[in-house]
Amino acid sequence: MPGPFTVLVADFLEETSIETPILEDIARIVIAGASVESSLEPFLADADAMIVYHDISIISDYTFRRAPKCKCVVRAGVGYNNVDRNAAKHRGVVVCNVPDYGTEEVADHAFALLLGLVRKVIPSHLEIRAGGWDHKTALGAPRLRGKTFGIIGCGRIGTAAALRAKAFGLDVVFYDPFKPDGTDKALGIRRVYKLEELLEQSHYVSIHCYLDETTHHLLNAQTIARMKPGAYLINTARGPVVDQNALLEALDSGLVAAAGLDVVEVEPLDNERLRQHPNVILTPHSAFYSVEGYVELRSKTALEVRRILLGEAPRNPV
């Protein structure tokens, strides 16, 4: 029989085959299937813990006021910008994330987007599908080796991207105001201390930072204007880090040659200009996913909930 606690899964999941073996001896699991915060209300009075994905745009004090028993919210993912941490702190609710589950997948995906753009994979594929067979679809493809690969945010995923970039023979440089001195030496890469300096020298720019008030529209009309003419932009982090309209203007002018985007400002994508742009590759916020990574994400989320409900210290409070 389930234990005395109730764990509320707010959104995204439709079954709990991975969570149940981890939690069933201490808790029953309830799936809300919510897409807006107000839909959680019928479930909140009994909730001792909450698991939150990204379908709900915000978990605010509206929720915490109605969940007096709630000890923790575990954001099943790296980013936690859809949880009001100040409201949680005020109510004594611990907020945690799962910072490491998709490290390999997102770094791999960033390079899949980059290679798809640089090697002109999609136009070549479409040309062949249309009945052609002409190497000229690849004309203009640059050599990677020796080019500069700029990383914005050198955390776990940014570090993994740096190691992959080195293997391709790229000159790797990163900008991250929060990393301690010596990170560049440990990784054998270069460091700059101003975003503009990175943008001015990078042939390829890959975003790997969190989304918060300091990084919202970090790439905007002014900063994009500092990019090396003909640079490529890859975003597998969060859509609002990039001002979408400014990026489209830069793509149209040729300042930015191409963009590979796993994330956009509004998801699902609602901008037809971006959807149809010939110099953009899009994937549906899927960089995090692999069969193994998805199991790891859900397992680590459930284990963090278990630790907190049993009175143990959480591993990843934010």
Image (tube, rainbow, N blue to C red):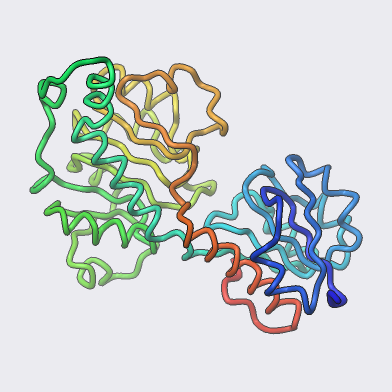
For the residue pair 140 and 62, the one nearer the viewer reads as 140
Image coords of residue 25 (percent x, y): 78, 79
- The residue shown at (63%, 59%) is 75
Relative horizontal placement of residue 8, taking residue 140 as reference (left or right)? right
Image coords of residue 250 (percent x, y): 31, 23
Q: Residue furthest front?
A: 131
Image coords of residue 210 (percent x, y): 48, 52
For the residue pair 151 and 14, the one nearer the viewer reads as 14
- The residue shown at (78%, 60%) is 8
- The residue shown at (30%, 44%) is 112
**The C terminus sits in image quarter:** bottom right
Up the image or down, 35 lies above or below 124; here it is below
How many numbered callouts? 0
Image coords of residue 134 (percent x, y): 12, 20
- The residue shown at (48%, 38%) is 239
**The N terminus sits in image quarter:** bottom right
Relative horizontal placement of residue 107, taking residue 8 as reference (left or right)? left
